[in-house]
């Protein structure tokens, strides 16, 4: 698993930012305590959950709620992903 996935939840109250070229065929199944706002450039990203596979074309974004197991498959290792991970409180209104 990529190193940054272990960093996402280290500080519960922080917003974590990760921006990088994918450089790999997929990111294995994982989840985090924080919600993920994912934006992609340079290709297509497929985000697979237990029940669905989502298609995320370049220049689009997606909100992944906290604790949702997902796998990320880019169309090419050259895809650039921009990720923001937000702490979400149980009392917060849902945002999808």
Image (cartoon, rainbow, N blue to C red):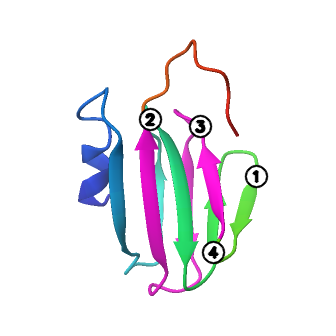
Q: Residue at x 75, y 46 (%)?
A: 51
- SS at mark 4? loop
Name the residue nearer the viewer: 95 or 65.
95
* Quadrant the N terminus occupies: bottom left
x then y, percent, for residue 93: 66, 21
Tell me which corner region of the image, top left, top right, bottom left or bottom right, holds residue 72: bottom right
- Tell which circle, 1 or 4, labels the residue nearer the N-terminal end: 1
- Tell which circle, 2 or 3, labels the residue nearer the N-terminal end: 2
* Crowding at mark 3 (Cα within 10 Å: few <14, some 14-19, many 20+): many
**Numbered badge on residue 65:** 3
Tell me which corner region of the image, top left, top right, bottom left or bottom right, holds residue 12: top left
Does residue 6 appear to the left or right of 46 in the view shown? left
Name the residue nearer the viewer: 25 or 82.
82
Does residue 78 appear to the left or right of 63 in the view shown? left
Is residue 70 on the magenta stretch?
A: yes
Q: Nearer the viewer, mark 1 or mark 4?
A: 4
- Tell which circle, 1 or 3, labels the residue nearer the N-terminal end: 1
Q: Which residues are magenta?
A: 60-86
* Crowding at mark 2 (Cα within 10 Å: few <14, some 14-19, many 20+): many
**Residue labelled with disc 4:** 59
- Tell which circle, 4 or 2, labels the residue nearer the N-terminal end: 2
Q: Disc 1 versus disc 4: distance between alpha carbons?
A: 21 Å
Q: Nearer the viewer, mark 2 or mark 1?
A: 2
x then y, percent, for residue 96: 70, 40
Q: Residue at x 53, y 50 (%)?
A: 37
**Residue labelled with disc 2:** 34
């Amino acid at each position: 698993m990529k190193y940054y996935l272990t960093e996402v939840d280290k500080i519960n109250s922080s917003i974590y930012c990760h921006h990088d070229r994918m450089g790999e065929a997929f990111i294995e199944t994982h989840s985090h305590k924080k919600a993920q706002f994912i934006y992609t450039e340079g290709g297509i990203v497929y985000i697979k959950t237990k029940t669905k596979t989502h298609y995320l074309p370049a220049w689009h974004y997606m909100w992944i709620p906290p604790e949702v197991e997902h796998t990320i498959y880019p169309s090419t290792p050259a895809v650039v992903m921009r990720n923001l991970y937000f702490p979400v409180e149980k009392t917060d209104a849902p945002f999808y």
